[in-house]
Image (tube, rainbow, N blue to C red):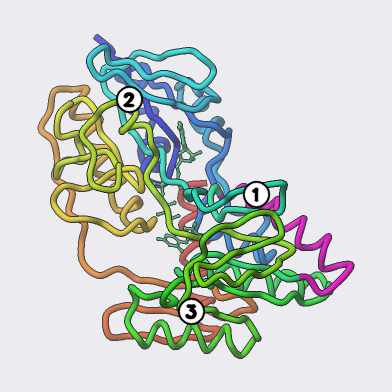
């Protein structure tokens, strides 16, 4: 008899499952996908969309359409929590959905704990949809004056956002803003020196100021306050402080890792509830901590697809192998990129061309 498969979020780890959804429905299983948007945005191309290298259509997947085309049901809503004993997920709208097998790919969010007051013009780098609103506001301000834009956080997404703001104003012919990155102690501290230096040089030659050595204490519309007591005014503020896994699991009392992500074993399966699976930024992989990068979500796809099918059909599960070193390419805007893999690191136009090629290929495969 057919069973109920429920997918929470149509993120990067569900791409293969969504594409091949018909294989579940053909076997008589009912598939329900729950997500807050009819589309899912490919984050790797988000900064490029901010910089107008891509349109929003170029970087999104028509999740709802894909689900319905393959005989599934799409519910436009957000999961707030779940009851693993009653095997039910609860929705923001007040409804609930029962499941036999559940797969969670609800991603991560940028915590806003440092924001003391928000009357607008504060944008987080996730969800990617926010970058569209930020783009409109940057163009409005830069059409009138030399604005000041601050980015709080010192990871690669800060660098990508900074470079693509410059590209945006250059392409649209508006006034180039002053950009400051508040990086806390060190900019891109978890990366090797040669990557940090190349990214810093690329930004410095374009007059992006990187302020190292002091943490941001609080942010409110128009103002950034540092631990040191210094204050900086700013027309627009981006929050790029790193991400935290979706809070669904902690709220549901499920076993989680130290970051609050769903604790999963090598089969991408909850360590306590064998009918719950997960992938992407919202999980904590028990075997070894994984960086919150789309690369892992993408690598998890075939295993998640296989294990959901196996779980419904009573077949053996497949173990996930995170694989070795992965290719990193940052889009630093204005045609510049930075590529790193193993011993190889180089910056410049070629790095961006390679990223653009890989990202477009990924979109063609799943869009
Ligand atoms: C600016 C930026 C650039 C990046 N560039 C790269 C890059 O070039 N390469 C790389 O490997 N990584 C990159 N990353 C990291 C990458 O974004 C993440 O690792 C990746 O998005 C994780 O995929 P995911 O599917 O787990 O989560 P997400 O992309 O966050 O997707 C989660 C999905 O779940 C949905 N959802 C969320 N909450 C709920 C809920 N409560 N109920 C139901 N559905 C929900 C969302 O709408 C979304 O569709 C970048 C991150 C940022 C912020």
Check if mark 3's residue and mark 1's residue have beta carbons within 8 Å. no
Residue shown at the point (54%, 43%) measured from the top left = 61
Q: CA distance from mark 3 to mark 1?
A: 36 Å
Sequence order check, earlier mark of 3 and 1: 1
Q: What residue span does the magenta drawing correspond to?
A: 128-147
Q: Using the rendered view, name the quadrant where residue 333 is placed.
A: bottom right
Reading the image, the residue beneath label 1 is: 57
Q: Nearer the viewer, mark 2 or mark 1?
A: 1
Reading the image, the residue beneath label 3 is: 212
Main secondary-structure element of the magenta-colored stretch: helix
**Badge 1 element:** helix
Indicate yes or no whether the magenta region holds residue 131. yes
**Badge 3 element:** loop
Q: Position of residue 350 (x, y in %)?
A: 51, 83
Badge 1: residue crowd in 10 Å (few <14, some 14–19, many ≥20): few
Reading the image, the residue beneath label 2 is: 24
Residue shown at the point (26%, 23%) measured from the top left = 101
The answer to whether 235 is drawn above or below residue 122 in the figure is: below
Of residues 253 and 364, the one nearer the viewer is 253
Badge 3: residue crowd in 10 Å (few <14, some 14–19, many ≥20): some
Badge 2: residue crowd in 10 Å (few <14, some 14–19, many ≥20): many
Indicate yes or no whether the magenta region holds residue 262. no
Residue 25 appears left or right of 175:
left
Residue shown at the point (69%, 64%) measured from the top left = 52
Of residues 83 and 338, the one nearer the viewer is 83
């Amino acid at each position: 008899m057919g069973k109920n498969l429920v997918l929470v979020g149509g993120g990067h780890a569900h791409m293969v499952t969504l594409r091949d959804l018909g294989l579940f429905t053909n076997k008589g299983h009912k598939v329900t996908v729950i997500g807050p948007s009819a589309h899912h945005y490919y984050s790797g191309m988000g900064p490029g969309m901010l910089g107008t290298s891509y349109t929003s259509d170029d970087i999104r997947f028509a999740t709802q359409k894909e689900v319905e085309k393959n005989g599934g049901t799409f519910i436009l809503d957000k999961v707030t929590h779940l009851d693993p004993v009653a095997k039910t997920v609860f929705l923001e709208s007040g409804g609930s959905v029962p499941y036999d097998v559940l797969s969670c790919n609800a991603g991560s969010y940028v915590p806003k704990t440092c924001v003391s007051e928000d009357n607008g013009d504060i944008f987080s780098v996730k969800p990617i949809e926010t970058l569209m609103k930020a783009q409109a506001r940057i163009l409005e301000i830069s059409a009138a004056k030399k604005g000041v834009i601050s980015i709080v956080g010192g990871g690669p997404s800060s660098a990508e956002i900074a470079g693509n703001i410059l590209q945006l104003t250059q392409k649209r012919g508006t006034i180039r803003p002053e950009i400051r990155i508040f990086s806390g102690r060190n900019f891109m501290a978890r990366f090797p020196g040669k990557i940090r230096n190349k990214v810093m040089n690329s930004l410095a030659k374009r007059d992006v100021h990187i302020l190292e050595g002091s943490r941001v204490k609080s942010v409110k519309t128009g103002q950034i306050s540092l631990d040191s007591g210094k204050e900086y005014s700013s027309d627009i503020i981006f929050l790029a402080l790193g991400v935290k896994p979706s809070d669904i699991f902690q709220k549901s009392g499920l076993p989680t890792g130290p970051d609050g992500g769903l604790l999963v074993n090598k089969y991408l399966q909850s360590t306590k509830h064998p009918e719950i699976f997960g992938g992407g930024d919202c999980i904590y992989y028990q075997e070894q901590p994984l960086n919150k990068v789309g690369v892992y979500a993408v690598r998890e796809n075939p295993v998640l697809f296989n294990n959901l099918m196996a779980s419904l059909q009573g077949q053996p599960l497949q173990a996930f192998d995170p694989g070795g070193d992965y290719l990193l390419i940052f889009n630093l805007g204005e045609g510049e990129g930075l590529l790193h893999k193993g011993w190889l690191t180089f910056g410049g136009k070629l790095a961006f061309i390679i990223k653009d090629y890989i990202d477009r290929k990924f979109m063609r495969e799943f869009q």
